[in-house]
């Protein structure tokens, strides 16, 4: 069985016909895939994707940029408390928020998540803001990870978590082999997935940050965008697995 760990927005979603074709392929081969969504969405936004945006039901989900893991059975999402306990050891959300406020150049996204704080930033100042925030973290003894994607979204999460680490934790816990795991993504907050796994699909519409990180490595660089690109990559890997 193939484990597919895929981002949602800009990867599976983004082209309605591509989503239709990808869903059809996955449904036809449902017994061959263990499907995991790995996304910055929270659980409410995840349900919206399932019930109003056309996503098929997964077997598990990595939400809030890797800070939450859920297993799914009969449509019921059950949080993984072991993962929460693992990443909560050094997490201080209040201190992270105070450090962000001290920069004076970040606008909150208005979300309230236990292990993630999210902001809007000015794209032209992304590198500068990262450096400023890292300095504040050092001064305030905040142990956290900064992830900037699309040049304008900044997430602060516990230092020992991201999509890749969550994916590694999940497949190890469920006894899924890494060699039959395929990841898929389109932006910088998917880089950690590609650092954690050796097989991946970079969709045709991927941002430069992910393309640079995946360059000169054995990943599939799809020509097609969004769902079509994921489908293109899955067909490539399925054929490759059959010849091994």
Image: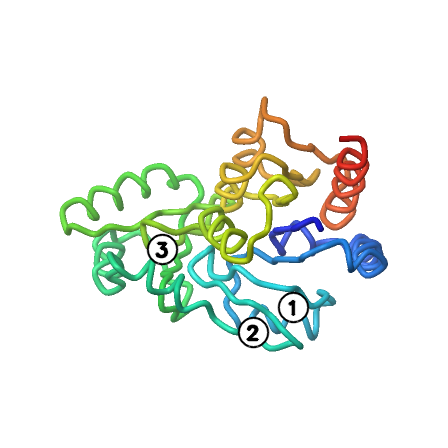
Q: Does dot 2 land on a helix, a strand or a loop?
A: strand
Q: Which residue is mark 3?
A: 157
Q: Which residue is mark 1?
A: 49
Which of these two is toward me, 49 or 15? 49
Question: Measuring 63% from the left and 36% from the top, which residue is drawn there?
Answer: 199
Picture layout, residue 73 above or below residue 55: below
Residue 69, position as x, y percentages in the image: 49, 63
Q: Quadrant of residue 221?
A: top right
Residue 177, position as x, y percentages in the image: 59, 46
Q: From the image, state whether disc 2 or disc 1 is nearer to you.
A: 2
Which of these two is toward me, 49 or 35? 35
Question: Measuring 78% from the left and 59% from the top, which residue is drawn there?
Answer: 31
Q: Is residue 168 left or right of residue 95?
A: right
Residue 194, position as x, y percentages in the image: 54, 38
Q: Is residue 20 left or right of residue 80?
A: right
Q: Quadrant of residue 138?
A: top left
Q: Residue furthest top?
A: 216
| Disc 2 to disc 1, C-alpha distance | 14 Å
Q: Does dot 3 land on a helix, a strand or a loop?
A: strand
- Of pointers 3 and 1, the one earlier in the residue sequence: 1
Q: Which residue is mark 2?
A: 77
| Disc 3 to disc 1, C-alpha distance | 23 Å
Which of these two is toward me, 103 or 13? 13
């Amino acid at each position: 069985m193939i484990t597919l760990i895929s981002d949602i927005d800009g990867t599976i979603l983004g082209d309605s016909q591509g989503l239709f074709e990808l869903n059809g392929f996955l449904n036809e081969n449902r017994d061959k895939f263990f499907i995991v969504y790995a996304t910055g969405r929270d659980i409410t936004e995840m349900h919206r994707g399932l019930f109003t945006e056309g996503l098929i039901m997964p077997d598990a989900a990595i939400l809030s940029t890797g800070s939450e893991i859920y297993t799914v059975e009969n449509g019921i999402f059950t949080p993984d408390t072991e993962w929460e306990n693992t990443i909560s050891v050094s997490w201080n959300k209040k201190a992270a928020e105070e450090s962000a406020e001290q920069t004076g150049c970040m606008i909150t996204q208005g979300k309230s998540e236990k292990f993630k704080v999210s902001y809007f930033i000015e794209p032209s100042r992304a590198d500068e803001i990262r450096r400023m925030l890292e300095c504040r973290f050092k001064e305030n003894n905040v142990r956290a990870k900064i992830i900037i994607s699309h040049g304008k979204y900044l997430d602060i999460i516990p230092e020992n978590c991201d999509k890749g680490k969550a994916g590694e934790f999940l497949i190890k816990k469920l006894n899924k082999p890494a060699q039959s795991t395929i990841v898929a993504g389109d932006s910088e907050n998917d880089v950690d997935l590609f650092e954690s796994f050796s097989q991946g699909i970079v969709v045709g519409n991927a941002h430069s940050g992910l393309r640079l990180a995946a360059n000169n490595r054995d990943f599939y660089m799809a020509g097609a965008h969004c769902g079509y690109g994921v489908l293109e990559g899955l067909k490539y890997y399925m054929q490759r697995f059959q010849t091994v």
